[in-house]
Amino acid sequence: MQTRNPVFTDLADLMTDAFGAARAAGDEARSVFRAQAERVAADMDLASGEEVRTLQEIITRQGEEIESLKARVAALEGKKPAPSRAAPASKRKPAAKKASS
């Protein structure tokens, strides 16, 4: 027959309570840190993620519009349109100079 020792039972209860208190303290510290970080970010007037994404979309559209306008200007001037930045540049070696006599 196995008996339960009250000392071990009390010790187990105490450890369970200690772990619960430690977890609660960790959660509290995490929330305090997060609130402080948000306060610092608000004081620094940083852009939100949504604002950054909106600006990235605007920049992308402006880049596309610039490329379109470059092509139109080249067509109006009768020139061959310059390659876009997205296209890889040709990697031809320059022609060797002929020796002059």
Image (cartoon, helix red, strand yellow):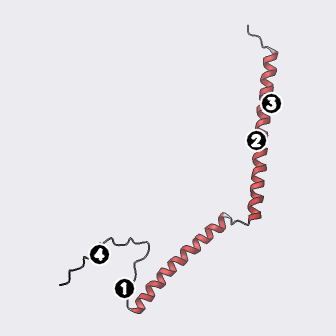
- Residue 1 point in image, percent of width and height: 73, 7
Disc 4 secondary structure class: loop
- Is residue 7 shown left or right of residue 67? right
Q: Quadrant of residue 62?
A: bottom right
Of the image marks 2 and 1, the number of the one nearer the N terminus: 2
> How far apart are the alpha carbons under marks 1 and 3?
78 Å
Residue 6: mark in rendering: none
> How far apart are the alpha carbons under marks 1 and 4?
20 Å
Q: Callout 2 environment at 10 Å: few (<14), some (14 to 19), or many (20+)?
A: few
- Residue 24 point in image, percent of width and height: 78, 39
Of the image marks 1 and 3, the number of the one nearer the N terminus: 3
Residue picked out by circle 3:
17
In this view, the residue farthest toward the top is: 1
For badge 1, the amino acid type reads: Lys
Residue picked out by circle 4:
94
Disc 3 secondary structure class: helix
Q: Is residue 53 above or below residue 98?
A: above
Residue 80: mark in rendering: 1
For badge 3, the amino acid type reads: Asp
Of the image marks 4 and 2, the number of the one nearer the N terminus: 2
Contact? badges 1 and 3 (CB < 8 Å) = no
- Residue 45 point in image, percent of width and height: 73, 66
